Image (cartoon, rainbow, N blue to C red):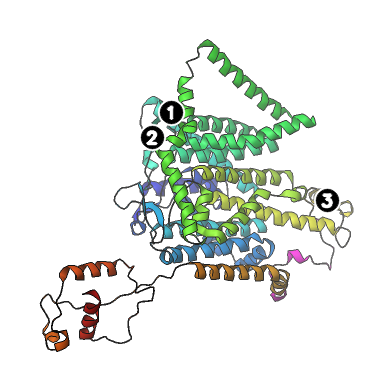
């Protein structure tokens, strides 16, 4: 293990910044995402894996939550009120078990794409087997899941919406700052000013040129990663601006859009085109309904001015935009016909083939890589893991849904913005992501959305019970309390009435009720698993592994010469070596029957006679 001094300095700076905002755990975790190529250390025992600094803040968050005095009651509260946490726990266990079992169970039966051990940063095709990324990638995934649970504990106990909002804005400001520094250094010819903080063991593709344009990487290792992060930050700032009219969010959105266009990343361009569709649909719906806001008029006006400016430039000199056209052609239109496009397509095809070769169980988390996040999920986690991942993604896509009226405007704006940020990251990963890990932003957004839904359900229940034991806000003497109740929907309960949702922990009756309520679902899943296992056993050809020890003497053994029946036996060296090679290949079968070794120590003379009798 090798500690990075630059990584320690960056961690200390981010921690001080988070303390300034009085939220070292949450703000520090989110702000550290701006440093996508800064590692805290390098683990040589795991193939040179270098955890980024966000893992330090994630571990710090876990330790802070675990040190809480009421941690077990808090966990009971989370598992009792947020049902998707059960799915998350199941997926974490399945991923960990699959990462250990499946590469060994299906070893040699399919191919995988792994990092070359001799050439740094090069992906090669090899037979499936255990690799160091089974440990590292699974560790990152489990860290993300535990971070989501820890955030749920914090968000359910106290309103921390402001901390979430500040954390994401600090991330966006740092991201824009790093991008502008990288852009200025490239235009000034000063080299890579951010090289000192690029301490990860990744291949740093920061000085490349695409169709005559510099490729922006910011604080990341390549333009593709920078473009994906820019897409996520742009989505957060845009949605928050549309929800609240924040000036800071509007200026950050403009800066983020500029950096995204200058990144020369295919991921950024295709992702921006995909995310423009819901924006266009929203604008069209507003215009058709006759409820156009000033922000929407500004967006349409800027788009119109941009189109007119481009047309005027073309009229003035039709060849002045040729470099831009060449850039679009090389990054989007002709991307699939390049060597990189062919290679990534081959990764995806072989990953889907691995899913079929393993009978839908998957090759194990981190065993291989693809060029699209959904394909990586299917090939590594199999059908069962993909179903659980789709469930969590569905929770994120749904967001607050019909519970939006039961939260205040600021909470709605923050939850919607964080949700948009995570979904934009999923879109970027679906274009060029190689791992089944959806990323730490996904888990943060999952915790924010799930916790907000739990609090909104509590508020809805309080409002529905306002005539059955809760005071109406008009009957509350304190004006401040009445105003807060009218906005949030949290009415003070009458004396003697207990809301079952507000219980501190779950009991045996809750567990029994849960099992009775979901007995059919549990039984159905168990039956489906048994049927899948039976189908695999019936349809898969049995393979066996045998081992033996053979004593071979080049000269005719005296032991065999003493026996008249075996006296004329001669040894053919070529036949013996050929037979040994077949046995070492692991595919030696005796007419489809299992090769077994008798119990106890076998006599050397009998073993040699039996072996020579089959081979000669």
Residue 531 location (% of width, % of height)? 58, 69
Image vertical order of residue 264 relative to residue 128, above or below: above
Residue beneath label 2, please? 193
**Magenta stretch bounds:** 490-509
Asked whether residue 99 is in view, the answer is yes
**In the shown orientation, is residue 404 left or right of residue 478?**
left
**In the shown orientation, is residue 66 left or right of residue 602?**
right
Q: Which mark is residue 184?
A: 1
Q: Find numbered disc 3 in the image and state the secondary structure of the residue it sits on.
A: helix
Disc nearer the start of the sequence (1/3): 1
Residue 77 location (% of width, % of height)? 67, 65
Instruction: Please tell me how crowded label 1 is: few (under 14), some (14-19), or many (20+) other residues with Cα within 10 Å.
Output: some
Q: Are marks 2 and 1 in contact (CB under 8 Å)?
A: yes
Disc nearer the start of the sequence (2/1): 1
Q: Find numbered disc 1 in the image and state the secondary structure of the residue it sits on.
A: helix
Residue at 52% in and 54% down: 377
Q: Are marks 1 and 3 in contact (CB under 8 Å)?
A: no
Q: Predominant secondary structure in magenta?
A: loop
Magenta-colored stretch includes residue 493: yes
Disc nearer the start of the sequence (3/2): 2
Could you tell me how far apart the alpha carbons at marks 3 and 2 are, in whole angstroms? 55 Å
Residue beneath label 3, please? 482
Instruction: Please tell me how crowded label 2 is: few (under 14), some (14-19), or many (20+) other residues with Cα within 10 Å.
Output: some
**In the shown orientation, is residue 246 left or right of residue 501?**
left
Magenta-colored stretch includes residue 545: no
Asked whether residue 29 is in view, the answer is no
For the residues carrying marks 3 and 2, which lies nearer the camera in this image?
2
Residue 35 location (% of width, % of height)? 46, 44
């Amino acid at each position: 293990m090798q500690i990075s001094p630059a990584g320690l300095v960056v961690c200390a700076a981010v921690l001080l910044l988070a303390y300034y905002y009085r939220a070292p755990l949450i703000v520090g975790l989110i702000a550290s995402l701006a440093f996508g190529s800064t590692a805290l250390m390098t683990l040589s025992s795991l193939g040179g894996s270098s955890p980024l600094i966000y893992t330090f803040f994630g571990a710090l968050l876990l330790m802070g939550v675990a040190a809480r005095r009421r941690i077990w009651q808090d966990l009971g509260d989370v598992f009792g009120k947020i049902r998707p946490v059960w799915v998350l726990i199941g997926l974490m266990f399945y991923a960990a078990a699959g990462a250990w079992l499946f590469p060994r169970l299906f070893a040699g039966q399919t191919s995988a794409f792994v990092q070359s051990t001799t050439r740094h940063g090069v992906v090669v095709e090899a037979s499936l087997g255990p690799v160091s990324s089974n440990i590292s990638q699974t560790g990152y995934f489990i860290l993300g899941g535990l971070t989501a649970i820890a955030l749920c504990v914090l968000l359910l106990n106290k309103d921390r919406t402001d901390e979430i909002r500040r954390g994401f804005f600090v991330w966006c400001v740092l991201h824009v700052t790093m991008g502008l520094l990288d852009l200025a250094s490239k235009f000034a010819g000063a080299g890579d000013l951010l090289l000192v903080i690029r301490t990860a063991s990744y291949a740093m593709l920061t000085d490349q040129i695409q169709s005559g344009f510099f490729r922006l990487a910011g604080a990341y290792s390549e333009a593709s990663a920078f473009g994906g992060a820019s897409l996520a930050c742009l989505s957060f700032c845009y949605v928050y601006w549309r929800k609240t009219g924040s000036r800071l969010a509007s200026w950050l959105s403009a800066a983020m859009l500029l950096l995204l266009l200058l990144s020369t990343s295919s991921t950024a361009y295709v992702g921006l085109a995909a995310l423009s569709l819901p924006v266009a649909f929203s604008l069209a719906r507003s215009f058709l309904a006759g409820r156009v806001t000033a922000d929407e008029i500004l967006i349409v006006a800027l788009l119109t001015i941009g189109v007119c400016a481009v047309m005027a430039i073309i009229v003035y000199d039709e060849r002045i935009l040729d470099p831009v056209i060449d850039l679009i052609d090389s990054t989007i239109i002709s991307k699939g016909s390049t060597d990189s496009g062919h290679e990534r397509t081959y990764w995806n095809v072989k990953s889907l083939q691995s899913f079929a070769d393993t009978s839908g169980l998957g090759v194990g988390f981190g065993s291989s890589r693809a060029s699209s996040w959904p394909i990586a999920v299917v090939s590594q986690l199999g059908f069962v893991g993909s179903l659980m991942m789709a469930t969590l993604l569905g929770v994120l896509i749904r967001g607050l849904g019909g519970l939006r009226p039961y939260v205040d405007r600021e909470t709605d704006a923050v939850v919607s913005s964080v949700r948009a940020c995570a979904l934009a990251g999923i879109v970027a990963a679906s274009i060029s992501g190689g791992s089944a890990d959806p990323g730490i932003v996904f888990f943060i957004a999952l915790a924010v959305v799930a916790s907000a839904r739990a609090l909104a359900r509590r508020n809805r229940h309080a409002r529905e019970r306002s005539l059955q034991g809760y005071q109406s806000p008009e009957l509350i003497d304190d004006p401040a309390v009445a105003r807060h109740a009218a906005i949030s929907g949290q009415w003070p309960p009458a004396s003697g009435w207990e809301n079952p949702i507000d219980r501190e922990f779950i009991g045996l009756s809750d567990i029994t009720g849960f099992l009775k309520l979901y007995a059919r679902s549990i039984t159905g899943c168990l039956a489906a698993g048994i049927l899948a296992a039976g189908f695999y056993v019936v349809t898969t050809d049995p393979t066996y592994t045998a081992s033996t020890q053979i004593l071979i003497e080049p000269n005719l053994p005296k032991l065999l010469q003493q026996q008249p029946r075996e006296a004329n036996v001669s040894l053919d060296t070529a036949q013996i070596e050929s037979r040994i090679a077949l046995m070492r290949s692991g595919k030696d079968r005796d007419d489809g029957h299992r090769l077994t070794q008798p119990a106890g120590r076998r006599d050397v003379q009998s073993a040699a006679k039996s072996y020579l009798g089959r081979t000669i």
